Image (cartoon, rainbow, N blue to C red):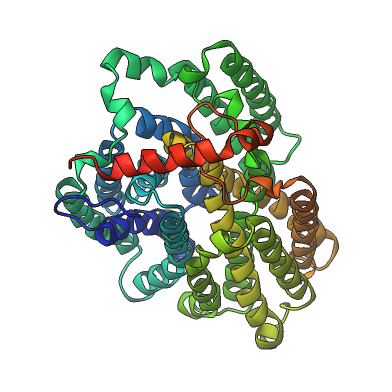
Amino acid sequence: MVREFPGATPVILLFLFCLAQFLDSFNNSALFSAIPALEVSMGMTESQSTWIISGFQLTFASFLLISGRISDVYNPKTAFVGGVSGLAVISLCAGFVNDTIPLIVLRALTGIASSMTIPSALTLLVNVFPDPLEQARAIGLFGGCGCVANVLGLMIGAMFVEWTSYHFVFWFVTIVATPAALACVFIIPPEISNTKGNLEPAAAKWKSLDLLGITILTAALILFIFAVTSGSTDGWASVMVLVPLIISILMVIGFFCWETIIPADKAAIPPRTWFYHNFSVLFGVALFPFLWWSTVFSIFTTLWQNVFEWSAISSAVHMLPIGVAAFAISFTGPLSRMFSPKWIILTGLSFCMVATVLLALGGGKSEEYWPYIFPAFFVGSAGAMLAYTHTNIAIFQAAPSSMAGTVGAIFNGALQFGSAIGLAGVSSIETSVEAKHGGSHEYNGRAATFWFLFAIMSIEFISVSIFYDRSTDHRPQPKHGDPGNPARRSTDSDEKINDTIIEKADLADLPV
């Protein structure tokens, strides 16, 4: 079942949401191709160029939660349009900047604008596609656009750098985001907004944001990601790493203590959230997919361009199997309604484990691309996309639709969080091994990072095998405040299913 809205079809709305996802991923990946040109043009040091990427990731991950709360409490259309518009304006300004510090600041602001688009887009998407099967398809395509943008971003960024200027990497975002923002204003109908939230008075909405809790957690995430990002360049024992790391951990503990004190309906992340069925284990799986893709991108773009001396375009072309496999798998969303997400996620992790072994054993020479790297890219990207897509679908089915913005923020925060922490660990392992075994022109350090990834995936595989509970697969989403206790639901399951069907029918019949 798909809700119909005047002046817009669900396909057009889905296209707009996917376009925002594409721009967010493009904003990050395209800069990988432009970093060498930026270093030469602005005289950047290696640590400064790292912050061109890390500045975006830091603010994007840190501001997701407040964006999700705004989307749940207020009209998500406003947050979505504001985020896309912000991307257009900030990217336009970034294209004219020729100094390092202002560019890093603008990249951080870009991360904030991007964080406004994802939870709001997911809130809108869940409301447009309330039927579980249609919702699974839509979420799969939404995620697939982000994965394809990662590879196309490398390609488009390389073409701009080779044929025009790195400035067009920023201006491309403005060229696409400006008409998209205008289209969103007129095409996205206000009826998609959270009905419950619209009925609340302004004062109640403001209190529901939990500004104190969000501020504590946002500051903690900024300090934590800053610490782990700086650890690979400044050293893990440095004051610049240890102090923010310790403070961030204490602030996270303080945040969860605060969330248990205030009323659940006023909390940014109500404690019951973690007790929705399989929510915690799905959160753990979400830490992995972006880490796998980011590690592959960072290792092979550096290897091919700095060691093999390939051009940026040639490196991007050799990455195409990753995007092709990811996009193909993005259409597998309906499988989650036929099979348990547990088996699909385990299959995806198995594919990634096989691919990671191939990358660890081969890849040190250019002639090893076809026997090792090419099949590993296909199999590994397909596996990561399976895990990503069906974890995304399952986590939205585990929690009430009224929490879609918050759940989207938690899920996407886990993706970025896992990538940031994992890349810091990967970089440290690679550097330490290379220092003892031949330097950066040898493959030993890179192989060690892939064995590290293999160990992480093995832990993920075991955790999902043991802790994922299949008893609630294909059940209706829990209502707001219901932790989804299977014992409670089994006694009156028919009544709850009928209530859910009636509620959805009522929603479909609302005048629009």
Going by the image, does 12 lie left or right of 484? Answer: left
**Can the viewer see residue 170?**
no
Q: Nearer the viewer, residue 484 or 327?
A: 484
Looking at the image, the residue that sits furthest to the right is 436
Spot occupied by residue 474 in the image (x, y as percentages of width and height): 57, 51
Q: Quadrant of residue 430?
A: bottom right
Q: Nearer the viewer, residue 242 or 57?
A: 57
Q: Quadrant of residue 352?
A: bottom right
Instruction: State the residue at coordinates (35%, 44%).
Output: 127
Q: Where 202 sits versus 28, above or below?
A: above
Spot occupied by residue 481 in the image (x, y as percentages of width and height): 52, 26
**Can the viewer see residue 501?**
yes
Q: Where 94 sits versus 305, above or below?
A: above
Spot occupied by residue 184 in the image (x, y as percentages of width and height): 21, 49
Q: Quadrant of the C terminus?
A: top left
Spot occupied by residue 11 in the image (x, y as percentages of width and height): 28, 61
Going by the image, does 484 lie left or right of 332? Answer: right
Q: How many marks?
A: 0
Q: Quadrant of the N terminus?
A: bottom left
Q: Nearer the viewer, residue 325 or 152?
A: 325
Going by the image, does 370 lie left or right of 51? Answer: right
Q: Quadrant of residue 109?
A: top left
Instruction: State the residue at coordinates (15%, 50%).
Output: 6
Q: Where 486 sits versus 320, above or below?
A: above
Q: Nearer the viewer, residue 238 or 88?
A: 88
